[in-house]
C-alpha cells in the first residue's frame, strides 16, 4: 500500500498551456466556467491595456474592459474563429473604449481630477519595482504625469497607434487590422507620435 | 518584474488592478448568473444590467428629490426674510430675545388718513407786487409809458462812411532752382557668420 510522500500537499493543477483559445471557446460555449476563466486570465491584460490606450484613465479603462468581457460572453456564439480570440476580444474592448471616449459623459469624466489615477500609478509603481522607496515612487509618478499631459496634446490618431504599440500586447499588423489601416501607416504614425511626444516633453516644465 | 526603460512603454504597459480578472469573472461567464450576489468571493456582487439601470434611476430620482427639497427650503427662507412681521404676533419663549416692535397704533393706522393729516394746508392765493425791472421791461416791450421820452434826449451818433481801399498784391519772386545731389551708398559686404552668431 503506497502512501503519498506528502499527503497534505496541494495537488498539482493540470496545465492548460497546450489548450488553444479555440478549444477554450468551444468549452466556454458549453458553459464551462473554467474554460472561460482561462480565457479571461490569458487576455485580460491585453484588453485592459487596449482600453487604457484609448481612455488614459484607469477607472474608465477598467469599466470598458468589464463591458468588453460581458459583451464577449453574451456574443460568444458569434465568434466564428476567422481571427484569433485575442484579436476579437481586443477589438470589442477598443470599440467599447471609443464609445466611452466619444460620449458626453466620458468627456465630463475626463474633466475630473486625476487623483484616482495618480493613486493607481503610485500603487503600480510600488508593485512593479518591488520597492518601498518613496522618492523613487514619487519620481515615477511625476514622470507618468508628464507623459500623460504630453500625450493629451497629441492628436488621437497618432496617440492611439503609439500607445497600442507601446502596450506590448499587439503587433503593428494587429493594430492595423484594429484601426483599419495599413501596417506601414501604423508604423509611420508611431514614429510621428514619438517625435511629437519628444517635442512636447521638452516643452513641459 | 522589471519596468521598461522607455517612458512611453512604462506608461502604456499598465498593470490591471489585482481583482480585475475576478471582477470580470463575477460579471461574465457561466458562473456569473448562478452565483448569488452574497456568495461572490471578492464582495463585488455581479449586477445584472437591469438591476444596475434601476439603481441608477433610483439614485437619479433621489438626487432630483433632494434638490427640490433644498430649493424649497431656500425659497422659504428667502421669503421669510422679506416677509413683514404680522401685527400683534407674539414673540417670546425662554431664551429668546423679544424684539422691539413698533407701537400697535403704527400697524393699525390708515396711510390715507395719515397723508391727509400730515399734508400742509394749502396757502391762500395772493397777488404779489410786480417787480420794478419786470414792470419796466413789460412796458418797454409794449411800447407804452415814459420810456420813449427818456431815450429821446440822447444825441445821435455820427458814423463816417467806409471807403474801400485798393488791395495791392505783390508778385512772388521766382523760387531758386533745386539741386538734387546724387546719393552715395556704401557697397554691401557679406561676411561669413561667426561662431558667436551661430
Image (spheres, helix red, strand yellow):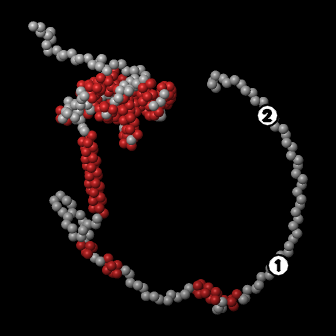
Q: Quadrant of residue A36?
A: top left
Q: Residues within 10 Å of mark 1 (few under 14, many from 20)?
A: few
Chain of the residue that carries numbered disc 2 in the rendered image? B
Residue holding disc 2: B185
Is B113 left or right of B41, judged from the image as shown?
right
x, y percent for residue B175: 88, 51
x, y percent for residue B51: 24, 42
Is A140 left or right of A189, judged from the image as shown?
left
Q: Residue at x 41, y 20 (%)?
A: B5
Q: Is residue A181 visible?
A: yes
Q: Is residue B19 visible?
A: no
Q: Residue at x 29, y 24 (%)?
A: A24
Q: Residue at x 72, y 88 (%)?
A: B153
Of the two numbered discs 1 and 2 on the same chain, state the one appearing first in sequence.
1
Spatial CA distance of label 1 from label 2 is 70 Å
x, y percent for residue B72: 27, 57
Secondary structure at numbered mark 2: loop
Secondary structure at numbered mark 1: loop
Residue holding disc 1: B160
Chain of the residue that carries numbered disc 1 in the rendered image? B
Using the image, determine if residue B54 lies above or below residue B6: below
Amino acid at each position: 500500500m503506497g502512501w503519498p510522500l506528502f499527503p497534505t500537499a496541494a495537488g498539482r493543477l493540470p496545465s492548460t498551456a497546450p489548450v488553444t483559445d479555440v478549444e477554450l471557446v468551444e468549452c466556454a460555449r458549453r458553459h464551462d466556467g473554467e474554460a472561460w476563466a482561462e480565457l479571461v486570465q490569458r487576455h485580460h491584460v491585453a484588453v485592459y491595456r487596449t482600453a487604457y490606450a484609448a481612455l488614459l484613465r484607469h477607472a474608465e479603462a477598467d469599466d470598458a474592459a468589464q463591458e468588453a468581457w460581458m459583451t464577449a460572453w453574451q456574443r460568444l456564439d458569434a465568434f466564428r474563429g476567422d481571427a484569433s480570440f485575442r484579436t476579437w476580444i481586443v477589438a470589442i474592448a477598443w470599440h467599447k473604449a471609443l464609445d466611452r471616449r466619444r460620449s458626453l459623459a466620458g468627456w465630463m469624466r475626463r474633466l475630473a481630477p486625476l487623483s484616482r489615477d495618480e493613486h493607481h500609478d503610485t500603487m503600480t509603481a510600488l508593485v512593479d519595482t518591488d520597492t518601498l522607496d518613496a522618492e523613487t515612487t514619487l519620481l515615477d509618478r511625476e514622470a507618468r504625469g508628464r507623459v500623460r499631459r504630453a500625450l493629451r496634446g497629441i492628436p488621437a490618431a497618432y496617440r492611439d497607434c503609439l500607445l497600442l504599440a507601446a502596450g506590448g500586447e499587439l503587433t503593428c499588423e494587429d493594430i492595423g487590422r484594429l484601426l483599419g489601416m495599413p501596417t506601414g501607416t501604423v508604423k509611420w504614425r508611431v514614429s510621428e507620435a514619438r517625435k511629437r511626444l519628444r517635442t512636447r516633453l521638452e516643452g513641459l516644465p | 518584474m522589471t519596468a521598461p526603460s522607455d517612458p512611453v512603454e512604462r506608461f502604456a504597459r499598465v498593470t490591471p488592478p489585482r481583482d480585475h480578472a475576478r471582477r470580470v469573472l463575477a460579471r461574465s461567464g457561466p458562473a456569473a448568473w448562478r452565483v448569488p450576489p452574497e456568495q461572490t468571493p471578492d464582495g463585488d456582487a455581479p449586477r445584472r444590467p437591469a438591476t444596475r439601470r434601476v439603481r441608477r434611476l433610483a439614485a437619479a430620482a433621489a438626487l432630483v428629490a433632494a434638490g427640490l427639497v433644498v430649493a424649497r427650503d431656500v425659497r422659504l427662507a428667502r421669503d421669510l426674510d422679506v416677509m413683514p412681521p404680522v401685527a400683534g404676533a407674539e414673540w417670546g419663549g425662554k431664551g429668546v430675545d423679544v424684539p422691539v416692535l413698533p407701537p400697535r397704533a403704527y400697524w393699525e393706522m390708515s396711510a390715507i388718513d395719515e397723508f391727509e393729516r400730515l399734508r400742509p394746508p394749502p396757502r391762500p392765493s395772493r397777488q404779489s407786487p410786480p417787480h420794478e425791472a419786470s414792470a419796466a421791461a413789460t412796458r418797454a416791450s409794449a411800447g407804452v409809458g415814459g420810456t420813449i421820452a427818456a431815450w429821446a434826449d440822447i444825441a445821435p451818433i455820427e458814423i463816417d462812411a467806409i471807403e474801400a481801399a485798393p488791395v495791392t498784391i505783390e508778385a512772388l519772386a521766382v523760387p531758386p532752382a533745386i539741386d538734387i545731389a546724387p546719393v552715395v551708398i556704401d557697397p554691401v559686404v557679406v561676411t561669413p557668420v561667426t561662431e558667436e552668431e551661430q
